[in-house]
Structure formats: C-alpha cells, structure tokens
Image: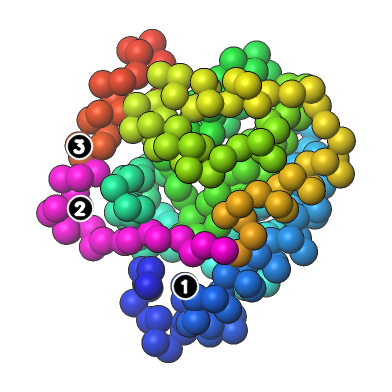
Amino acid sequence: MFDPFSDFETAGYLRNFEGLKDPDEIKVQEHAFFEANLEEALDRLSNHNGPLAYEHFLEVHAILFQDFYPWAGQDRHMLDVGRLVEKGDVQFEVAERSRQAVEWGLRMGNDTRTIRLKPGAVMGAFAWGHPFLDGNGRTMLLVHTALCARAGFSIAWQLTRKNEYLRALTAEIRTPDQGALDEYFRPLISPMSSRDDWLSQIIALPGLDGSQMDENVAYQANDADAVERYTEAARTRAQSLDPSNSQP
C-alpha cells in the first residue's frame, strides 16, 4: 500500500479522515467525493476569466478531495513527502520540480492555438509533474477539459480505450512533445459539447469509477536506485525535447 507518511497503521491510507485501510472502501469513498464535488470544481474553473495557474490546479484538487484527505490541495513538495514517486515503470518529476512541470503544461494550455495543436503535450506535462500523492488523474482531467473548452473543442473521452490511452500517455511522459498523445487524441477531438455531456463522460470514464487504486510507490530521497531511475527518465525527456522548447 502506498504509504509516504509511514503511518498507514494508525492513520489509514494517506491519512484519510476516516482512517480507512481497505482498498475497496477507499476506492468507493474517493469516487463518491469526486462525483459529489465535480460540478463545483468545474464551476470554479469555468468562472475564472484569466489564464489558469498552478493555484487553480491546487484548488481543483482541494475541492474534489478535501472531505476525504486533510492534505487535499497541497502538493508533494508542500507536504515534504514523496520526493521520488513512480508507478510501475513510469517515473515522475521530483517533488520540488513538479510545480514547474505543471506550469509548463499550463503555459501551453492557456494558449488556445497551442492546445488545439498539442492537447497531448499539455496532458503529458501535467502527468509528468504528478504533484499530488493521489487524485492526479482526476484533477488534470478537469483542468485539461476546461482548457480545451476555452479553445472551443472537447475530447470525446467516451471513445477512449484505457489501455491504449495509458500507452500513449506513458510514451508522452517518456518522450514529451513528440506527438505520441497528440496523435492518440487527434481522432477524438470534437466540437465543444454541452456541460451535461462533460459531466456524464467524465463520470463514466474507466478508471475514475473507483475500480482501481493508484499504484504509486514512494522512495526515500537518498534511495540511490530510485535517484538513478529518475535521473535517466529526466535525461531521456530532455533529449527528446527540441532545444527551442521552454520546458523547465
């Protein structure tokens, strides 16, 4: 079980308010709070007129999960846990640079022309940043949906296939801005749909229905093997980027 606070036995999974430890109960509760707070989070994004910033990313996470996690709306760096995190064989940005990664995605996403051309690059930047201990996928999905709406289009998420999407997202994380996720999204781009469509599509997405737990693993900051894996992932990403890009 993912236990970056090292207090699972006394505080439950990620220090949840109810002290829950059973994976099935946790999955149900997480999704219940997500579904209950989804409209409020979308309202907050929709009602903001200026560019979306990292603070809005944090705010969305807080709205979605503050009833379950006392640390909702705080990233890994703020909490000073989970500096090195990976899921399976996918590495994520170190905690102290996760904000920069998300902000790179927001800079692209706030430019309507860029997100029309590179919706996958935007999502990949969010995923590489992986700022939160849990709830990253749900949070970045809502922010990405709002950014797409501002640019006048939507992603037909109901047509996605989970395994194919995750393969494309993994490729985007490893070699950013090379078109892996952009190509996957391309046939799914559609005219702006109604708000009701957004809600129904998001709620019905496989993986958001409480059927799966995050499989994150956190390592000590001085874990040599984890540092080496992260360093190699960061090197591969840097090599894949065009020198003119402004990725942090």
Q: Earlier in the sequence, mark 2 or mark 3?
A: 2
Region of the chain picked out in magenta, as a range: 211-230
Crowding near the residue tagged with mark 1, few <14, some 14–19, many ≥20 C-alpha atoms within 10 Å: many
Q: Are marks 1 and 2 in contact (CB under 8 Å)?
A: no
Q: Residue at x 64, y 18 (%)?
A: 116
Give the labeled residue for mark 2: 226
Give the labeled residue for mark 1: 14
Amino acid type at image mark 1: Leu
Give the labeled residue for mark 3: 232
Q: Residue at x 87, y 35 (%)?
A: 194
Is residue 211 in view from this perspective?
Answer: yes
* Image quadrant assignment for residue 143: top right
Q: Position of residue 36 (x, y in %)?
A: 77, 64
Towards the viewer: 186 or 77 = 186
Question: Which of the image's four quarters has the C terminus?
Answer: top left
Marks 1/2: CA distance? 21 Å
Crowding near the residue tagged with mark 2, few <14, some 14–19, many ≥20 C-alpha atoms within 10 Å: some
Q: Is residue 153 above or below residue 168?
A: above
Q: Earlier in the sequence, mark 3 or mark 1?
A: 1
Q: Residue furthest bottom?
A: 10
**Scheme of image coloration:** rainbow
Is residue 125 in view from this perspective?
Answer: no
Marks 3/1: CA distance? 28 Å
